[in-house]
Image (tube, coloured by chain):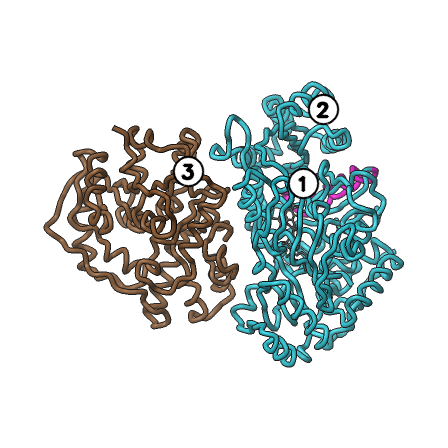
Chain colours: A cyan, B brown
Amino acid sequence: MQTRFKPQPIAIQAPGPGVIPPCNVASDSLIGIPRQQTNPCRWQGEGWQSFVTDLVNRGIAVDERRSARTLYQSDAGGIAHGLPHGVVVARSTEVVAGILAAAQQHRVPVTVRGGGLTTEGETVSFGGLQLDMRGMSRVLEIDASKLTVRCEAGIYWHSLAESLRRQGLDYLSAPLNMTSSVGGTLGVGGIDINSPRLGCSADQALALTIVTPTGEILRCSENENPWWFNRVLLGYGQFGIITEATLRIRPFTPITMHYFYYQDLKQAMEDLVMVSEEDAADYMGILTMLDRAVNLLVAFDSEEREKEFFRKWRPRLRGFGEARFALTLGMHYLLRPWKFREALYLLNRKRTLLPALKPSHHLRDNRIVDRTVVFSQAVWKFWGGRQMVIPDLATSRGKFIEAVLRGNEVCRKYFPHYTLYCVGIKLIGPKERYELSCIPPDAEDIAYGCEFEPMLEGKTYSRDHIQAFKNEIYDIGVQMGTSYYRFGGMMKGYIRRVFGDELVDKHLAMKREVDPAMILNRDVIF
Amino acid sequence: MLSCPVWQQSHTQALTMCGRARLIANGAAEEDLAESAQACILCGSCEPLCPRGMDTQRATLSLRQQLVKRGLLQVIGTHHRSRQTGQVRSEALFLPGQTLRDHKPVLEQCERLLGNRVLCAADDGTDICHDLECGTEIDDKRLEDFLAPLRDAREIIASDGMMVNFLSTLLGPKVRVRGLGQALLESAQVRRGIKRTDLYIIETRTFNGRRGELVMQYESLRQKTGCFMNLDLHRVATPTGAMSAQYRMNHQALVSVEAQIKWLLEGRSAERIVVEHLEDGAAFRKHTSLPVVHLAEVAEP
Ligand SMILES: Cc1cc2nc3c(=O)[nH]c(=O)nc-3n(C[C@H](O)[C@H](O)[C@H](O)COP(=O)(O)OP(=O)(O)OC[C@H]3O[C@@H](n4cnc5c(N)ncnc54)[C@H](O)[C@@H]3O)c2cc1C
């Protein structure tokens, strides 16, 4: 049941942690869509000075210059804006521990940021301290025989890849965006096109060094402090800060890539599910131009796997090769001349995008070298911008197709051009790790996700237009009982509606126990 | 930011081009930009990756100029004006720069490889490049004197990347301006001389400023010879930092050349260093015991 929201006076004082106050912004701007205030009120700064003095006594300098603080005023989403009172660039686990101990004592909120690629303001401080983890970016140890790497958590995946490549090694999977940090990614999940085989990035972690919200330094893994391990992984920075991580790695391989084109989104999704569940390829995902040119991409680390795919699975795929697809699409638009603008858009997009996915300087013997660089460059070039609008849904297999088809309708309604990016996520961790996370509770074996990304193309859309679009996508999640890749920050109002009070209260109680003053990433989830 | 040596060594966003751009967009005061403008070594590694396609080197140079003018930035040091001994006019001119002139045998080898068609200019404009890099105003008359013979040329080869970029902008598309490395690599003798166990150090300012144009030339050289190169995964050239005014003038520098060299060698079993610019060579000589040669010296007879 949807209820109309009644305007409320603006709350001057920040409400207690864990309490979501009513929205005070443009209450009638989203008719029919109930909203709650999710952009937190600014923390008023009580105790800040004694906190800073305490840190100085511990040998930790806080940068309070306005210029330093403005660097953190928003995240990749570009919708939430806020300023911290001060900034510290973390340089060691001990510094992080000192900060959290003092923050707990002085009740000062601490917002942790890695790459800051969140889109709902999760890494934006509304007062308090901003802790930039990227100062901890060293690779500490590469063990080529055990295929593991130990690194500091603020390191970008790109920098990690650079070090690993010098030894002929590579990480397993990471977001297709190399300016995300290892710690931030382990905290939210991390999905790659090999996730249907290898799981999310968080599941690559073998051991962590964390700092608890009260400033204790702990080592944790499946065998050592497993409760902490499973709470911090996929935990949105609620239960601790990751300062070091030991990850699984693998030998580096160039890949071969193939694209199959569909006009029918549903068919393509069915085929994606089939190749994912039957482990037919090493990498697989769907990338679309609107819902007209749907591209199922598959890629392989080895020739054997590639050959096997073409022998066993290719005959079952309903997608076409490029030439045949161009012909059918051409026919489609010839019969619908009034849609010539759409046809032109697709043609132009194909002309610019496809070469960017196969740049000649990254090709050797027709294999792509450094696919992560190729993809992340293309992601920024073709989908990036000052404002990233990428609401998503993460579902079980049974709900995947309906959720994407419904989301697709929402995209069509709000934007002339958009992309859908779908991929599977193998569940290889223990169930309790996935509780209250991007992995939907009803998923078994492989979960599926879809990002819905409008092409803003330099046009200015009102904040409410964008928010209304995102809310409509998120509402599908509520109605269908899915989860979201990213569900913190401004969309935290959805958390209770999606996961239910019982589960959220269970986690809130755990949070209160380990973080009595609720200082760590306080407005992200609770 | 990913390839920026200042970022890699400091992990402080405000000191990078990306940080400066954000600070400016956020309305930062000029004095808040001084430290960052001074930290940059103008290697150009941010340029190929800039999501907004900015001419980042030019942006930093003009920021430095502005800051120096307002007394907010200390000039790194002054360079004495290059001595001119008349003017050389030719269709193809070579500006070797002072360092190469000080190494006569290497210079002669370069000239031999470039051929008789290319004449060595009398004036390298080294002082102009230095002033440009430090943000000092360039005297109009001096600039005009320097440019006069260059305007008649169809082709200019310069060993200093800053000069290559500067002249390309000033002289426009009619004059083909190239780096010494690209010109020497046209010689099969030179290409043949590069071995699988070499670490080839590309002069970064020219390469990064024109990466789109040059990347395939170097990538195919790498594939053919199997040598190591100072290219990162993005195919952006990683600098040693030795070309920067801060290093040349012994000025306090954020980017440690020693750390850069250590990183360039990490995990690479290089047996010899081949450099396109002698300043890089000198830095390798200082910090390693590996043999170092200029690209011109590898040419096989
Ligand atoms: C253009 C674009 C493309 C993207 N593509 C993908 C993709 O392909 N796959 C994918 O999975 N995601 C993708 N994302 C989302 C984004 O990459 C992930 O959210 C990313 O992994 C976050 O990493 P980060 O370092 O930016 O973390 P941040 O955004 O800085 O932080 C994420 C959360 O973790 C917390 N946190 C940060 N560091 C730590 C730490 N050390 N310890 C504990 N908590 C911490 C923060 O407080 C925050 O709540 C994309 C985003 C954008 C903008």
* For residue A347, above or below residue A208: above
- The verdict on residue A409 being magenta is yes
CA separation in Å, label 1 and label 2:
19 Å
Residue in the picture at 57% in, 32% down: A254
Label annotation for residue A381: none
Q: Is mark 3 within 8 Å of ligand 1?
A: no
Q: Residue at x 69, y 51 (%)?
A: A186
Q: Which residue is mark 1?
A: A421
Task: Using the numbered discs, state the Cα–Cα distance from disc 2 to disc 3 in whole angstroms.
Answer: 37 Å
Question: What are the residue bounds of the magenta stretch?
Answer: A398-423
**Circle 2 is placed at which residue position?**
A317
Q: Main secondary structure of the magenta part?
A: helix
Q: Quadrant of residue A50?
A: bottom right
Instruction: Using a 10 Å C-alpha cutoff, classify the residue at mark 1 as few (fewer than 14 neighbours), some (14 to 19) or many (20 or more).
Output: many
| Horizontal and vertical percent position of residue A386 | 56, 54
The reply to whether the magenta stretch includes residue A221 is no
Residue located beneath label 3 in the image: B215
Q: Residues within 10 Å of mark 3 (few under 14, many from 20)?
A: some
From the viewer's perspective, tell me whether residue A287 is left or right of residue A352: right
Question: In the image, is the residue at mark 1 within 8 Å of ligand 1 by its beta carbon?
Answer: yes
